[in-house]
Amino acid sequence: MSNVATAEAMIAAYNAQDVDTYVSYMTDDACEANYRGAVVREGKEGTRSGLAAAFAKWPQNHAEIVEKQAIGDFVIFREHVTRGPASDGSELVEPFDVVAVYSFEGDKCSRVEFIR
């Protein structure tokens, strides 16, 4: 499976809100972070629990891949994200675009950084 196909499979699992499948594509010490900033989900377990909480809050959450490119061990997606109404009644989050940079070690994703 190519790195692009792996990142696409991660998005498919994300959209299905299948956190176990999503993290199965990651290294054990993988993380999700803001670009050049703070780690927001650390390791497979941190990613699993963080995404589970996000999906509980936004059950209609969805990311659409708008553009994609592979460069060496990196895959770059421009994604359009919609959240839908929050289950806790908090204010609606307007749809937004994000650039996600997926870094790979071998056939596993080791880091995802978000530029928003």
Image (cartoon, rainbow, N blue to C red):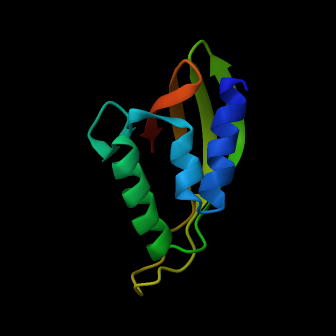
Numbered-mark total: 0
Q: Is residue 13 left or right of residue 88?
A: right
Q: Position of residue 29 (x, y in %)?
A: 35, 33
Q: Is residue 95 visible?
A: yes
Q: Quadrant of the C terminus?
A: top left
Q: Is residue 21 left or right of residue 28?
A: right
Q: Position of residue 103 (x, y in %)?
A: 50, 25
Rendered position, 39 above or below 95: above
Choose between 94 and 75: the one closer to the eye: 75
Q: In the displayed image of the protein, which residue is found farthest to the top?
A: 72
Q: Residue at x 54, y 38 (%)?
A: 99
Q: Position of residue 37 (x, y in %)?
A: 28, 36
Q: Residue at x 26, y 40 (%)?
A: 38
Choose between 73 and 92: the one closer to the eye: 73
Q: Is residue 21 left or right of residue 29?
A: right
Q: Quadrant of the N terminus?
A: top right
Q: In the displayed image of the protein, which residue is found farthest to the bottom?
A: 89
Choose between 114 and 74: the one closer to the eye: 74
Rendered position, 45 above or below 82: above
**Where on the picture, by quarter, is residue 67?**
top right
Rendered position, 70 above or below 85: above
Q: Position of residue 16 (x, y in %)?
A: 66, 62
Q: Residue at x 51, y 45 (%)?
A: 23
Q: Residue at x 69, y 40 (%)?
A: 8
Q: Is residue 93 visible?
A: no
Rendered position, 16 above or below 35: below
